[in-house]
Image (cartoon, rainbow, N blue to C red):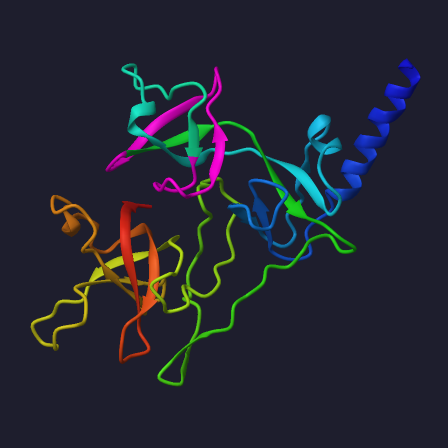
Amino acid sequence: MKNFFNLLSVFLATAAAALAAPLGSATAVHTAPDETSAVITVLGAGTEPVATLGATMANTPAGWMAIELAGPFDGYVLNKDILKSLDVRDGAPIHLAPKPESGVLTTMAKGDKSNITGLHGKWTQISLQKKITGYIRIGSVASAPLPVPAPTQVSNAPVSPAPMTPVAYGVTTAGQSVAMVNLGDGGSSALPRLVQGKFVSTRSAFHPRRPFDWALDDDGGERYAYLDVSKLLLTEQLDKYIDHHVVVYGAAKSVPGSKDIVIVVESLQLR
């Protein structure tokens, strides 16, 4: 029996090494082995994922691979789950975004380390120091490519994805970047997501009033989206963000009668 378990361990290690080959294309990492589950991050082409061994790997369904993500991670917990010591309550779900319907990144366990990094209404933002397990699709090639939606059509003019250095949902680890696709489908049902860029004012005494007073610029100084900040708290001091790189969480939609895009901002922070 001991020899059997030794052979099984060798087999699992060999299988994991074979599966953890460099990814051939950008690959989404899900919270569960299910394509409808939330995306934690997207690993770039050439990344070598670290396979999770043991029971997790053995129980992972065919067509998926359980991998280890090192962190740190940005996460959100309800304020009621913050103790008087400012620690997160053991067993509290840590969400990917400050919304109850957002995916759960992981659950707080005894010994996990976290720091409070922000407040968002009923939610507290934390930085979590913990290794977690994610899942990627596998097949005959090293990775499954991400589906890229067709460009949005507004007034018969195609809108291309924003030129930007993308960020991942909830992940702050260097080298784990997310390949951004189209910012939205132009409808009110567009899902919120994280985007980043330089926060700029569109107000000018020498130019006509823009549809919105704030916008995001890419690294080349070109505007790629207006910002609708009407959902932010009135006490938010927006001037402190001017000409700084920021991370914005919100849903994107088309500006009626133009080919411009506006992001309805739900949270804003310096990068």
Query: Which residue is nearer to you in this view: 41 or 192?
Result: 192
Q: Is residue 29 above or below residue 192?
A: above
Judge whether residue 103 is colored magenta.
yes
Q: Which residues are magenta?
A: 95-122
Name the residue furthest bottom: 156
Q: How many labels, in total?
A: 0
Question: Quadrant location of the N terminus?
Answer: top right
Q: Is residue 212 above or below residue 271?
A: below
Q: Residue at x 47, y 74 (%)?
A: 151
Query: Which residue is nearer to you in this view: 62 or 227?
Result: 62
Q: Residue at x 65, y 52 (%)?
A: 46
| Quarter of the view holding residue 251 | bottom left
Q: Is residue 101 left or right of residue 134?
A: left
Residue 121 image position (x, y, % from top left): 23, 37
Specify whether residue 250 is in view.
yes
Q: Residue at x 41, y 43 (%)?
A: 101
Q: Is residue 163 left or right of residue 40?
A: left
